[in-house]
Amino acid sequence: MSLSKKPYKGTRDFFPKDKRALDYIFSVMRKTAFEFGYESYDGPLLEEVDLYRAKSGEELINDQIYNFLDRGNREVAIRPEMTPTVARMVALIHREEAKPIRWFSIPNLMRYEKPQKGRLREHWQFNCDIFGAPEGHGELEILTLVIKLLKNFGANETQFEILINDRRVVDYIIKEKMNLDEERSYKLYKIIDKSKKVSPEALEKMVDELNLDQDAKNVFNKYLAVSSFGDMLHLLKSEGAPQERIEDLVSFSEKLDKLELIKYFRYDPTIVRGLDYYTGMVFEVYDKHPDNRRAISGGGSYSDLLKIFNEAPMPGVGFGLGDVTLKDFLEIHKLLPNFETPENDIFITYQTEKAEIEAIKLANSLREKGLRVVIHFGELKFKKIFGLAEKKGAQWVALMGEDEFNQQKVQIKNLSTRDQKEFSLSDIDSIYSNLK
Ligand code: HAM
């Protein structure tokens, strides 16, 4: 029997050029998190399934989780998301920590999905979460951070937008104005969450199954027609919403305006998020490119997640942004640098076997200076040198033929200008300054 060379369905091998792209993506994520004072953390790959059962929602538990019984009969799962883990970790230490707690992580996660564009079974997800920030402040910071992240990749408001909503507003409409009980509210949330992915007929059919009365249907249709902060305010006022709901929305949109961030946002009533723990603001970052209209990131605020560990409620706000959707976004907007070749400083070659030890010594001395040095083993014919050096991504080539060896010299050639200079092998400082 011969084994398949392909990776497991929906997972990826990262060959060096793919890994260079991923490392670059991670480096921008880390840089951005540090710009905002977020500290790096990580958790285990496996958690007990109950951690997700508590608040992650039926889709994740019923369809997506990779779970199994361990040898001690515990039901465990490969982490499908990071939020329950971070909440668990914060619940362990929050009493000793100054608030707010600002943490980030880039875990690999697994979900049993039908692999397709933007959706795989394993992905890496940048998570930033803030705990214990005063009302509204954490939300604003998390949104500012996600915008800065995309700007740090070179993106602007013509390329992405943030679709935003608030579960307190949705709750008011569904529970207070449509008078739905908990069960039908939950179902309607799931229908709204799916609404963009299904046809208008399919949406109507799903809503019909809830047997709404005519008044409720009217309110729901008005709600779905909202497409701006202004529309939402208008609807809340006309439906007699509490002053607090209205003021929150006004002050939030005013802050976005004053910070010149409003251009990134659009109020979207269909954004409610599939995960059950969100209680306030919810958002998704969307690619604006017509050929890639999909969410790159999603997040929101969750005030009660620590309660599942019998802790007092502490507000959390955060987002997750996956490497798969981000890479698609960067590629379609031509924002991803070329990672075809590695990056090295110098490719050291010798044209006579006798120079082997000199070549290794030179390489080691330059490495001591912090340069990235690749050495070619064995004699290398002159005509092959430059092609190989380019494949190694080197800027410079060192050449040592019979004459150079006899005189203890080395030729250093710049691959782009083709300038060549001769140096004494003992004069490492001059060689190094020439390379810089
Ligand atoms: P989520 O919306 O399930 O949220 O995932 C966030 C992002 O992760 C998505 O927008 C997408 O970029 C990426 N993602 C999710 N599933 C897949 C997949 N199967 N293949 C590729 N990419 C995927 C959460 O996971 C929340 N825990 C985020 C969060 C953090 N909320 C608060 N803090």
Image: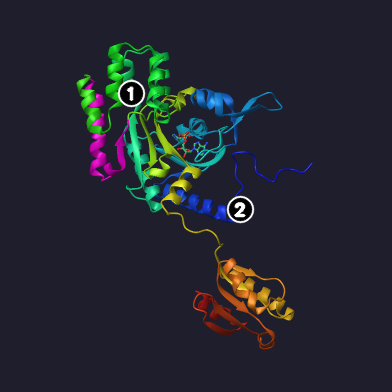
Q: Residue furthest right?
A: 1
On the image, the x and y values in percent for residue 433 come to 51, 77
Q: Which residue is mark 1?
A: 170
Q: Is 182 covered by the magenta stretch? A: no
Quarter of the image with the N terminus is: top right
Residue 256 visible to the viewer: yes
290 relative to 1 in the view: left or right: left
- Name the residue rendered at 33%, 16% in the picture: 175
On the image, the x and y values in percent for residue 262 come to 27, 42
Q: CA distance from mark 1 to mark 2?
A: 45 Å
Q: Main secondary structure of the magenta part?
A: helix
For the image shown, how many numbered marks are present on the structure? 2
Res. 108 mark: none
Residue 130 visible to the viewer: no
Res. 15 mark: 2
SS at mark 1?
helix
